[in-house]
Amino acid sequence: MAVTPIEGLAKTTTIRKPLISPRLELVLVNALLIALCAAVIFPVIYAVLVSVRPDKLGPTMAFSLDTWFFGHYTRLLSSDRFLRYILNSAINSIGGAALTTVCAAMAGYAFARFRFRGGNLMLGIVLGLMMLPGLTNLIPLYKLASDLEIRDTYFLMIITYAAYGIPFGIWVMKNFFESIPRELEEAAAVDGATPFQGFLRVVVPIAVPGLISVFLLNFVYNWNDFLTALLLLSSTEMKTATVGLFDFQNQLAGNESELLAASCVIIMLPGIALFLAARRAFFQSMVEGAVKG
Amino acid sequence: MRVNKIYPYLLVAPAMLLIAAVSLYPTLYSLWLSLQRFRRGVASFGGLTNYQFLVTDDNFWNALRVTLIFGVFFVLITMVFSFVLALVFNRRLRFGPLYMTIIFIPWMLSEVVSGIMFLWIFNFGIADALVAPFFGEGYQFLASPVGAMGVIILATVWRSLAFAMLIVLAGLQTVSREIYEAAGLDGANRWQTFWQITWPLLLPTTTVTILLLSIQAVNATGMFLSITRGGPGRSTEALSLYMYNQVARPPFDFGYGAAISVVMFLLNMALAIFYIRTLRRESTTAAA
């Protein structure tokens, strides 16, 4: 500060009277936020309400709060095809997220700790890819996968999801490792551990929170992915839940909204549940990935 | 710590190989594909034919226009709302975490699920009932080009709002409280404080958020697919959807699809370079 505050100055400056009292303001802010939250969550609540209304009401906004009909859920959960879609989604998203986490942890550690030739270039590529969504390479990927005859395989989906998640994962893990003091590994080295042992036994255990957030965030993104799966998967056996839902929406053409609603609810459950369980991890990794340069 | 020179390379190898195979190589391959002509699934070298067709293709220009209109409204609306929300959440409200959790839920949903849920609101008469006083009974949102675009923009803002807000909030929290206290001492009112302190200090954060949202806007596909599939007519056929349609429908023209994806890549690239430069500038000013 260039000017030193002078005693008593605060008294001479005119203290503006606020337009509304702080208490009223707090009430207003809360009321607005409650209204906003209600509007935001409404589609989700409404999907739940549609999913438990009795069979085939057609395109009407009606719902009933007294009778909860779970027939659509039992029908879905006894459908082999639906369960297969869910299983495919689970395999692809867990596999992809796990592979992302392992690769991102190793690479993030290398970028955080070592200076090596080509390192900055690689980091630049990583940062660039973080900004470039997978959409623009979908067509060549589809063509390549067709030529190599690996479309409709878990392998293809897992490596694709893993690669999409890696740049962001590296960024988050790099920031995480940079906050861990080097002395820990140096102590391990003095005790005779190899560098890789030091990484695995000393650094990784400390980095578990970071690893979990990378895994969870990627799991949810993979689970919700729609476009990649839509283009790369065509056999009924291998389709994921979101692609199945899209097909289902087309086939039904407005009929059986209740069954569609029940599938929506089941598909959105893992994402919401994981988010509620690990909010902090999600927020932190999202901010780190987006703004820390 | 002394380590073998190869060690860092071994650590980055799995990640780099995956990126190279799934992201880098296909991107280069799309350049090559875009120079091919596909006739009944058979490719032959066509030079710049696809690009020549592109510049004269009305549907391509339409798609570009749709993407731009969508992008401008989506980014603007999301920015304004996320700014206001971030300022509110920066004040440590008692139920702040609860509100924030609820607002974040849409970001955790798949675009197909979101799209279907929005369709119900507009097909089951809920939205019609809400707007009846303004538009009259039975306004068919999804049947009019403007209405359909409005629904997609609304759904996308709904999904991205919390994410944008979180980034602005993170930026706000780096502005130290002392600056505000000093401003309060100098007798600045809230309006002045916002425009003279918060806004200039947040400018880099704002730029970053706008760029991240713009990248999302250029690549938005899921909502378009699940809500309108481009209709009515071609009024919501965004660039991404037009690209997708080239390979998802007959005549399965990979060459032309690849040409469109090269254009999209360049759009993304321009935004990404801008983004990285902003981050760089921000970190150098922060260090100074």
Image: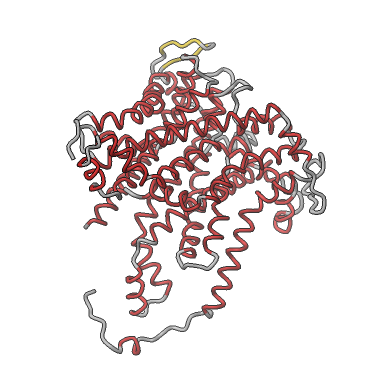
Q: Where is residue B1 in the image (x, y as percent from the top left)?
A: 18, 40
Q: Can residue B249 be seen in this view?
A: yes
**Residue drawn 31% across the image and 34% down it:** A125
Left or right: B146, with B4 as reference point: right
Q: Position of residue A237 (x, y in %)?
A: 62, 22
Left or right: B176, with A134 as reference point: left
Name the foreground residue: B231 vs A171. Answer: A171
Q: Can residue B55 be seen in this view?
A: no
Color encoding of the figure = secondary structure
> Picture quarter containing residue B118?
top right
Left or right: A134, with A34 as reference point: left
Q: Where is residue B152 in the image (x, y as percent from the top left)?
A: 59, 44
Quadrant (top left, top right, bottom left, bottom right) of the N terminus of chain A: bottom left
Name the foreground residue: A53 vs A202. Answer: A202
> Picture quarter containing residue A57?
top right
Residue at far front of view: A191
Left or right: B32, with B93 as reference point: left
**Residue drawn 39% across the image and 47% down it:** A290
The mark total stands at 0
Q: Position of residue A110 (x, y in %)?
A: 28, 37
**Residue drawn 57% across the image and 32% down it:** A89
